[in-house]
Structure formats: structure tokens, C-alpha cells
């Protein structure tokens, strides 16, 4: 039987990936962020999941305004890094787990989550930067990956509650998969940041730390937070945090935070990382 | 009046905004293709011709006026592709949109970012 053994919440700032790709992680600017990633990587080396379900968003890389699926799941054998406007990141191709992905796609739809099914899905920094953060720079990513792409670019994204409920459904469906697999669920994006407008640069550290606390102790309370509160308090791009609630929903009622790291700034963002284990 | 209308300096990319910026954003999207980037760099005006952008949008693209691009329906993830092409960072763009020098913007971020206090409502902005 497949089982979810942990959840990871992490920012997916493109500059974090670029710092790794350009060998700048030891610089004064980046070292404090990357030092805090080391224990998380150590945890990941010990944990060695078979599959990572990565809940992320595309940033005008694969999906454009032509078609905007609210939830899409990648069922392919392999997902190539996307060209986001400056050539694809030089990171390994991402290998999928089509059997579990199709099991998820079919059963999510039958459980009333109307997924878009993607066979051809180039993945951008939203997915590859979290892999880089947790796995470093291997020649091959050490686990299979199932991308679940959430629209958070075109307003409105799905509600936090809907994301949380999606996570709960993912947990039930993973548990019904016959093969013996260990699964880690990633929720990515955030934390507070605003890239656009005269208010660009907003960071709200108390908001971010409260979010990390309540992700453990009060996820149901977090699911009641309306979009306007994210936009106002965490910046227009801080709304990506709804994707962390999908991860949290997949972990059950009670969790233990086994690691946390928070650092300002990573480019224009409050960068957070949390590792949660059920129980 | 939308519930987010009183958030200052913020252009929520809702349906109204998306409709206004569709052609502009789809032009930006075309820059994901290396061959298109080359064509655009070779002759920006010619590349923009016939793509359905308004004269104001074309002017803002050519002038790399990122705040104006937002006001004309642009979405930052799309319009930022122009900055990438120019080798400019998100901090450069953020500084330009908020009328700061890039140096001052970077310094502000190092000091914890733009404070949320005083920046929640239009009245206090």
C-alpha cells in the first residue's frame, strides 16, 4: 500500500534556483538561506521517498491565458524543464509515476475534483526549484514526481479550503494504491511577496510565521482565510500559499513540525520551508 | 467595488484585467520561444505589428514602462519576460514600478522588505 509519510512546504523563488545554477550559494547574500536548507536536505537523504507529489503553479510557462486549468495533474513518464523566457534551467528532466498519477487522476475526478489531465507538461521553476532546494544538484532526481499544477496567476485561484480538501482526497487515494510506495507531498510558493505595482516588495514576516504555526495547529482556521486577506497581508503573489494547504490536507488531522527555516529576503520574497510529519 | 479595490499599488489580475491585457500578455508569452526572442530583438516594432496590441500597450512595451504595462492589463509574470530579455532582475522591475532606485529597492529588501504597516489600505498608502 502506498502511504504519505511527510509534507514539505517551501517557497519556489526562481532566484534560489539561479543561485544554485550559477554557483552563488556561498555568497554573503545567499549563504544564510542555503545554510538553513542543509538540515532539510539531510532529512530528505534519510527519508528517501519513492514519489514526490509536488503541488505547484506554472508562471506563464506551459499554461498561458489561452487555457487556464484550476487543477491539472501530470501523468506523463517524463516532464522537461520549461523555457520561461531565458532558456530552460539546466536541471535533470523530471520522471513521473504514471501508474500512481493515473490512479490519482481517475479517483480524484470520481471524487468530484475535476482535474485537467496533462500528458505533455513542461515544468517551470515552480516545480524544479523546490526539487533543487530539497535534493541539491544530482545528475538524476532521486525520486519520481507527480506534478499537480494549481492556477494562482489568473484571479481567483481555488480557495484555501478547496486546496485543503484536495489534499485530503489525495491522501485517501494514495492509500488505496496497491503498490508499496512512500510518498512526500510538497506544497510550494509563497511566502509573503508582491512582485507588482507601486507596493512591490511587501513582506509580512509576522504573517508568514503565524502561517507556519497555524499550518501545524490550526489548518482548518487557515482554510477560512479569504483571498483578499492573502493579497492585502501577504502581497498579491503571497496568495500562492493556498497550495501549502493542499499539502497540509494530505497529512491528516495532527502533524509534527520536524524542521522549519525562514529567511528574508530571497530576491523579493519571504522564503519559508517547513517539514511536517503525520502524527 | 471589489473587496480588494482598496489595496494600494496592487493590480489584481481578475477577469476585467485579463481581458484588457490578453493580447499584450500573449505577445509576452510568445517570448518563451527562442526563435521569437531573436525576431523581437532584431526589430521590436515589426514584431509587435499585427498582434492586436493597443498603441498605448506598444508604447509601454517599447519603453519598458512596467507600471504602465500593469495598468494596461499586463500581468507581471508575462511582462517580466521583457525584463529577462534585457537581462534585468525582478528587483529592477520592482524598483521601477515603485519609483525607487534599484539600489534603494535592494536595500529595502535586505532590511526586511517594504513594511506592511501603512501599506494595507489606499487611505494610508
Image: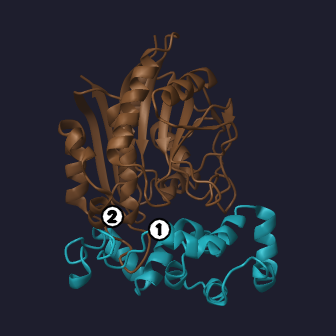
Q: Which chain is brown?
A: A
Q: Which mark is residue A14?
A: none
Q: Which chain is cyan?
A: B
Position of residue A256 measured from the top left corner of the image (x, y, whole percent): 23, 29
Position of residue A276 measured from the top left corner of the image (x, y, whole percent): 30, 32
Instruction: Decide if residue B125 is in sight here.
Output: no
Q: Are marks 1 and 2 on the same chain?
A: no
Seen at 65% across and 59% down, the residue is A66
Seen at 67% across and 89% down, the residue is B55
Tell me the crowding category of disc 2: few under 14, some 14 to 19, or many 20 or more residues within 10 angstroms, Cα based.
many
Q: CA distance from mark 1 to mark 2?
A: 11 Å
The image quarter containing residue A137 is top right
Q: Is residue A148 left or right of residue A159?
A: right
Residue located beneath label 1 in the image: B13
Position of residue B91 measured from the top left corner of the image (x, y, whole percent): 46, 73
Instruction: Decide if residue A174 is in sight here.
Output: yes
Amino acid at each position: 500500500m502506498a502511504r504519505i509519510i511527510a509534507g514539505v512546504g517551501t517557497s519556489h523563488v526562481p532566484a534560489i534556483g539561479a543561485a544554485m545554477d550559477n554557483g552563488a550559494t556561498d555568497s554573503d547574500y545567499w549563504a544564510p538561506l542555503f545554510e538553513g536548507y542543509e538540515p532539510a536536505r539531510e532529512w530528505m537523504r534519510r527519508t528517501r521517498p519513492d514519489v514526490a507529489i509536488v503541488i505547484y503553479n506554472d508562471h506563464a510557462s506551459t499554461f498561458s491565458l489561452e487555457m487556464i486549468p484550476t487543477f491539472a495533474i501530470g501523468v506523463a513518464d517524463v516532464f522537461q524543464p520549461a523555457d520561461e523566457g531565458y532558456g530552460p534551467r539546466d536541471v535533470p528532466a523530471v520522471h513521473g509515476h504514471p501508474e500512481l498519477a493515473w490512479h490519482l487522476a481517475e479517483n480524484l475526478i470520481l471524487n468530484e475534483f475535476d482535474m485537467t489531465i496533462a500528458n505533455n507538461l513542461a515544468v517551470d521553476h515552480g516545480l524544479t526549484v523546490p526539487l533543487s532546494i530539497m535534493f541539491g544538484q544530482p545528475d538524476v532526481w532521486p525520486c519520481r514526481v507527480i506534478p499537480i499544477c494549481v492556477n494562482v496567476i489568473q484571479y481567483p485561484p481555488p480557495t484555501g479550503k478547496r486546496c485543503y480538501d484536495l489534499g485530503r482526497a489525495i491522501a485517501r487515494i494514495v492509500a488505496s494504491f496497491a503498490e508499496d510506495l512512500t510518498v512526500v507531498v510538497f506544497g510550494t510558493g509563497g511566502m509573503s511577496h508582491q512582485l507588482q505595482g507601486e507596493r512591490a516588495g511587501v513582506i509580512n514576516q509576522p504573517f508568514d510565521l503565524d502561517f507556519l504555526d497555524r499550518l501545524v495547529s490550526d489548518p482548518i482556521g487557515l482554510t477560512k482565510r479569504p483571498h483578499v486577506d492573502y493579497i492585502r497581508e501577504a502581497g498579491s503573489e503571497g496568495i500562492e500559499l493556498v497550495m501549502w494547504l493542499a499539502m497540509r490536507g494530505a497529512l491528516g488531522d495532527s502533524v509534527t513540525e520536524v524542521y522549519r527555516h525562514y529567511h528574508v529576503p530571497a530576491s523579493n520574497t519571504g522564503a519559508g520551508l517547513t517539514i511536517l510529519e503525520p502524527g | 467595488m471589489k473587496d480588494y479595490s482598496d489595496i494600494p499599488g496592487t493590480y489584481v489580475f481578475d477577469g476585467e484585467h485579463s481581458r484588457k491585457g490578453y493580447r499584450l500578455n500573449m505577445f509576452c508569452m510568445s517570448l518563451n520561444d527562442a526563435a521569437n526572442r531573436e525576431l523581437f530583438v532584431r526589430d521590436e516594432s515589426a514584431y509587435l505589428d499585427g498582434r492586436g496590441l493597443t498603441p498605448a500597450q506598444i508604447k509601454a512595451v517599447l519603453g519598458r514602462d512596467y507600471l504602465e504595462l500593469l495598468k494596461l492589463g499586463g500581468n507581471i509574470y508575462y511582462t517580466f519576460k521583457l525584463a529577462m530579455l534585457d537581462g534585468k532582475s525582478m528587483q529592477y522591475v520592482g524598483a521601477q514600478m515603485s519609483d525607487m532606485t534599484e539600489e534603494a529597492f535592494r536595500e529595502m529588501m535586505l532590511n526586511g522588505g517594504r513594511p506592511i504597516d501603512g501599506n494595507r489600505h489606499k487611505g494610508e498608502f
